Image (spheres, rainbow, N blue to C red):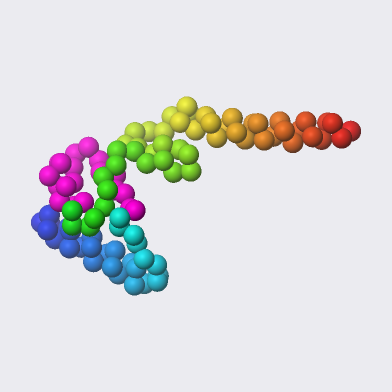
Amino acid sequence: MQPGAILNFSSKFFVDYCRWNGQYIKFKKSMILFCKVVSKRRRRRFNKELGLRNVYKITYLGVNIGLRIIKAYDIQFILDKAMHTLNTWASRLLSLA
């Protein structure tokens, strides 16, 4: 498949997606994460055609999502926050008793 054909397919896919579900994709706010084997030239062309920003890692719900395996320390703050909430609830129950 030619690179131009991939871009045409991608842009057609996004247009069809918007038409099917009635939602609109704001490409100025959207980002794309490429793997390491995609050349810089192809990244620039894809970004230029679709108007997307190129990023190297994305933070979703506080968790860094990148091109590597998520480790325990990546989500440690979620566990700390949950433990803090549970400890707060427990201390409230104990103080009422």
Where is residue 20? Give x, y as percent.
Answer: 36, 72
Where does the image place residue 32, in percent across and percent down from the top left?
Answer: 29, 48
Viewed as shown, does residue 67 lie left or right of 22?
A: left
Between 88 and 2, the one lying in front of the other is 88
Tell me how many marks there are.
0
* Residue sitting at x 33%, y 67%: 17
Task: Residue 95 in the image: state x and y as whole percent.
Answer: 84, 31
Q: Quadrant of the N terminus?
A: bottom left
Residue at the (15%, 41%) spot, across then down:
40
Q: State the image quarter where residue 54 is shown.
A: top left
What residue lies at 33% left-to-right and 53% top-to-bottom?
A: 30
Position of 92 compared to 46: left or right? Answer: right
Above or below, comparing residue 2 to residue 65 in the picture = below
User: Relative to 68, does residue 16 appear above or below in the rendering?
Assistant: below
Q: Which residues are magenta?
A: 29-47
The picture quadrant where one finds residue 79 is top right
- Determine the residue located farthest toward the right in the rendered image: 97
Left of 52 or right of it: where is 71? Answer: right
Residue located at (83% from left, 31% from top): 94
- In terms of depth relative to the viewer, which is nearer, 41 or 38? 41
Q: Compared with residue 16, is residue 27 higher up or lower down, i.e. above or below?
A: above
Is 5 displayed left or right of 23 in the figure? left
Residue nearer the viewer, 22 or 48 = 48
Look at the image and say whether residue 40 sits in the magenta stretch: yes
| Residue 42: x %, y % from top left | 14, 47
